[in-house]
Amino acid sequence: MNKTSVKKHNICVIGAGYVGLVAAACFSKLGHKVVCVDNNLDKISALRKGKVPNYEPGLDLIIKNSVRKSLLYFSDSIQSGVKQAQVIFLAVGTPSRPNGEADLTALEKVAFEIAKNLDSYKVIVEKSTVPAQTGIKIKKTIQRYAKKNIEFDVASNPEFLREGSAVSDFLKPDRIVIGVESKKAEGILRSLYSGIKAPLLVTDINTAELIKHASNSFLATKISFANALSLVCEKTGADIDKVSQGMGLDQRIGKGFLKAGVGFGGSCFPKDVDAFIHLSKKVGYDFKLLTEVRNINRQQRMRFVEKIKEELWILKDKVIAILGLSFKPDTDDLREAPALYIIDMLKKEGAILRAYDPQALLKAKKILDKVELVDSPYKAIKGADCLALITEWDEFKNLNFTKIKKSMRLPLIVDGRNIYDRKHLEKLGFKYIGMGR
Ligand code: NAD
Ligand code: UGA
């Protein structure tokens, strides 16, 4: 990062969620002056008190430093945010509608608010993940409601960060994509990112929007491919982890996102695959490949439960210890977490559930019923008939299995992320079941 060459800008980020807050914090770390706006008053008041609403490694420190240097502050007023900024990032949620289509209500609302408060040239940048052609709609909305004769640009700058490694993903990305309609907007966005060393791809807005949906859908496809393979591995006696490793060493394939397990969750892959299927259908293409990606993902969670049932036969009154609730490690995010679906299926079978997660317990408390939430993995496991590993937190990798063997009613481990060594556990007397190995 080269701080000296960064031209400073006034930025407004609308939406202080997993993406908006990280973007706001990282832009301020690069030396820009940033106001982060959210209409959730509790969130803004917590942030003003120095409390970061989501668990994201490294984020609290950046926020603390930037606030101290007066480079970052928080507001619930779009009006004041927009007036002070030359560049406005839209980072509000774009969840799924029941038919899979992206719900762009929040985005439209914010575009309307920006239009009402537009008083000088600004670049309005989509950071939220949106279907292709959303930029056109945002532009029309602003033109419709803005005061006359005020020049503005709309741009797309999709975000590729992952939760749990969001800060380093933002500051050291594989690439930066900007979709623009004018040289002026391109220049501003280029200078905004001049402190980050990464390939920068400039496209039109539709293309930038599509790059994001295509990237997430392709990564989800890789995961479902590995998960489908895991089934074939089980039937043929092959080991999915070795198969993925052997494939991934080919640079044309790449080793990332080939890890089989209980499937992908989170607020992005499931909704973005759905939105891309919907968009494709709208323009006349039935993207069956992606429909199958989604099906394989759902089946994988069911396969995990089937494995438990196969061993325990009747689940009613069996005690199952759930290790890991968040959709992946290093986040407290429970959105579309495989654990929630698995818990639901186990509950329907009448199992007694005890769960532990290093960061997501607080959020879990608000949405889970009939699951005893405990504050250590050992408490969850004590007296259990099955240890069901769902999220591969580091904390679970080095548990004391000699102690666990003594405390379980039945020494059964169903490992949904293939983190344990079968031989070692079998030597200790456990029955071990993995996914595709
Ligand atoms: P989020 O739900 O965590 O955050 C959205 C925020 O926007 C919330 O705090 C909400 O209160 C606020 N908001 C909604 N309407 C508003 C309004 N009218 N005015 C002001 N604030 C408003 O969502 P997120 O996970 O940060 O995702 C945001 C977008 O970024 C989505 O389109 C998502 O697909 C995309 N994205 C997310 C990730 C990720 O890892 N979470 C990564 C890349 C892209
Ligand atoms: C994903 C993308 O990786 C980001 O590039 C993108 O910006 C983001 O979605 C988004 O658009 O919001 P994220 O959902 O935070 O990021 O997390 P990932 O690390 O991609 O994991 C997603 C899910 O896939 C998790 O449930 C994870 O357990 C699962 N996964 C991942 C696998 O099952 N196997 C793998 O090999 C990799």
Image: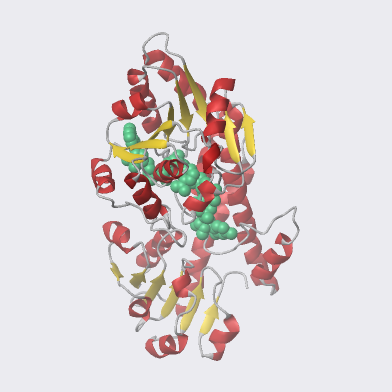
Residue 12 picture quarter? top left
Going by the image, does 34 lie left or right of 275?
left
Residue 159 visible here: no
Q: Which is more toward the observer, 317 or 164?
A: 164
> Quadrant location of the C terminus?
bottom right
The residue drawn where x is 34% and y is 24% is: 83
Viewed as shown, does residue 255 lie left or right of 161? right
Work out whether 100 lies above or below 56: above
The residue closer to the viewer here, 139 or 166, is 166
The correct choice, above or below, for 202 with respect to 353 in the image is above
Left or right, 99 with respect to 280, comes to: left
Residue 172 in view (yes/no)? yes
Seen as rendered, the residue at the extreme front is 4
Residue 209 vs 293, above or below: the answer is above
Query: Image point 39% across, 67% down: which residue?
Result: 346
Q: Nearer the viewer, residue 299 or 64?
A: 64
Is the residue 42 above or below the residue 433 in the image? above
Q: How is the image coloured?
A: secondary structure
Rendering coords of residue 261 (x, y %): 55, 64
- Number of dots carrying numbers: 0
The quarter of the displayed image where residue 215 is located: top right
Q: Where residue 388 appears, x then y in whole percent?
A: 45, 73
- Residue 233: percent from the left, percent from the top? 67, 69
Give how far across and how far down residue 139 sits, in percent: 47, 20
